[in-house]
Image (spheres, helix red, strand yellow):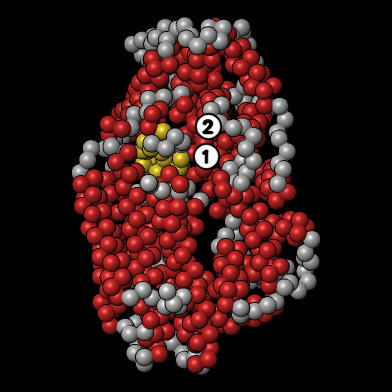
Amino acid sequence: MSGHRTTAPPPALAVLLFRDALSRANHLIDEARTLADYEYRSPTPPRVATLIQGIVTRGQQSIRDEWCEYQKVTSDEDRARILRNVQVWDSVLRTTGSRLRYIIGASASRVPGGLGLLLETIIQEQGLGDGILLREKWTYNYAVDISPIEQSYRDALGGELDSDQFISLFGSEGSYRNTFAIGFPAIERNNALLHCAIGHELGHIAVERWLTHNYDSDPRVALESRDAATRLSSQPSDGEFELDEWVEIMAATERIRTARRRFLQEYGSDLYAIELFGPAALLSMTSIAMSQELDKEPLIQTDYYPSWRSRLRFALDWLNRDTPDSWISRPTSKNEWAESLASHLHHLDRFLGSAPAVGNPEMAEADRLAKQTLASMGPTIAFDVRATAGSRKQAMDQAYILADRISRLTPPNDIGSDQRQPEYPMLWAILNAGWLYTIRENEKSNHELVRGGASEGVVNRLILKALGDVIVMRDFRRFLEQGEPA
Amino acid sequence: MHDTKQFMAMKYAFVTNRVLRAISCLRSGRSLAPDAIESFDLAAKLLLEMRRGAALVAGSTVQLGYSAESIPAAARALGVIERLSLASRASQVHTLLESFDSNLQILARGSKLEAAKLDALEQFIRALNQSLTEEVTQATLGKALEKPENVGP
């Protein structure tokens, strides 16, 4: 070995990259075409499959164009440049291709109907977007792609395609749709109670919008991060930096800025979930948190994920906040459901204790700055949710009635007393009824592993059925009143 | 969050590639296509973000504006400048980025640039393109191969 490295690989190796990338593109186009013909519960998945097919076809053509150019150029640097561009296109293909798993996970047999309907309804009523690509995933977590699916590709390919190519792929500006992908753990497919955690994922969409409009372009955010980084490093804040000092300050500023934003995303999304789903959101979060380390500090390796204890503490305090229309209020008459819930929340409060101190100084600064921003972000997000979701107290009052129905193994889809003229409840009331029933049965069973009453499976089926019934009937009424197809 | 950063890196990897292709065209005396001119403009926007982020972190009072991309862009620029040893002090970085930005704008207007300035610009954009490509490919493939569970017998 001579130890000398040329900029570009020799043609014999370069051709392998071209061939492989083109072969991957062929395969992806076939897969996307097949998936577009599957059966889905909403029009979003096949539309995304068709978009992916279009992007990959464009990528395939670009790689062919690069091959033609590669054969013409003679300099080592030009060849290296072309190969780097093929690598970037190949990355687009691989990233795009991996999104095909979203389409597979969204096929009709893999997504519970009631849940899909619930989310489509919420996202439209809350003004968060046009649709949801709800999919199961085999990694055990709930997740949302914060950028709308099409936006990511528009951002990336905006650097490469001319305007005609761009419009042929994505359509004109007006045809753009705000569709988000949300994943749920496949092994929890029918666990409607746990799916209340999706309130947090919806929160990410709302919070991201707030951050984009009120936070990201505010220079004070970066200045505060820079000041914190400078304080911690004891470098001069306004003097002339040496380059290596500057690189260090820049990196620390970016870490604090990124961590602060991440904390805001997580706390803000928890807040949104509490506002939307009430106790049901907190209880599903707690259920997930109990299987994990509660006090894990935010690290770069975990994308600065705040500790579960901090999140639960914040969410519980937000739920208990004293507001004119609170989820938690004292019922006027004796109510065993409300008493069970109060007792459960009291236990949780004692278990959580106070929010843990953050050890890493940079993360502590990011946490302090995030809490400062939350003071203005929280009330705005809460106001927006309540403006469309209706009274929280009323939802809870309905949940108490519906919990009684669950205890009679009846779907919680009617709060009236006349079966011939059902009164449909609020969607959030159905979810909370399921949790109220579960908490009380756990309490009654005296913490035995096998509890009495309806099993979790039965409760979840009743809830999914009720969600589906209520949404379908609401759409049907709208059709009768306005003549609009749902 | 990662996805957003990765897609932005893809965008600027494409843009810097187009700039390099356009410079190659200029050197060979061929006429530039409209999309090449557009690429100079897009790259100038990236340079502006770099200048914004750098100015802000250095505590400069120059009003350049600010966006979510400013700090990441500046961090990328500093990495490249450090790697190429193009500057040793903050003030030199400002001057350097300002001159690259201004030279890109000259090219975007369809005007000619002195050979030495074109060389310096090309060197910076090439290193930036390489750095962005590494970022993109690392995000989509590198990590997957390096995960211990993927290391077979």
Q: Position of residue B38 (x, y in %)?
A: 41, 77
Q: Position of residue A208 (x, y in %)?
A: 53, 48
- The residue at the point 66 percent across, 53 percent down is A256
* Residue underneath mark 1: A203
Q: Check disc 1 and give the amino acid type.
A: Gly
- The residue at the point 63 percent across, 14 percent down is A343
The verdict on a common chain for dots 1 and 2 is: yes
Q: Cβ–Cβ below 8 Å for labels 1 and 2?
A: yes
Question: Label 1's element?
Answer: helix
In space, the residues marked 1 and 2 are separated at their CA atoms by 9 Å
**What subunit carries mark 1?**
A
Q: Is residue A193 above or below residue B118?
A: above
Q: Position of residue A271 (x, y in %)?
A: 59, 36
Mark with earlier residue (1, 2) = 1
Question: Camera-side residue: A226 or A205?
Answer: A226
Which dot marks residue A436?
A: none
**Mark nearer the viewer, 1 or 2:** 1
* Residue underneath mark 2: A276
Q: Check disc 2 and give the amino acid type.
A: Leu
Task: Mark 1: give few (<14), some (14-19) or many (20+) Cα within 10 Å.
Answer: many
Left/right placement of residue A161 relative to residue A442 reads left
Q: Is residue A409 above or below residue B135?
A: above
Question: Camera-side residue: B113 or A379?
Answer: B113
Outermost residue to the front = A1
Quarter of image, res A11: bottom left
Quarter of image, res A245: bottom right
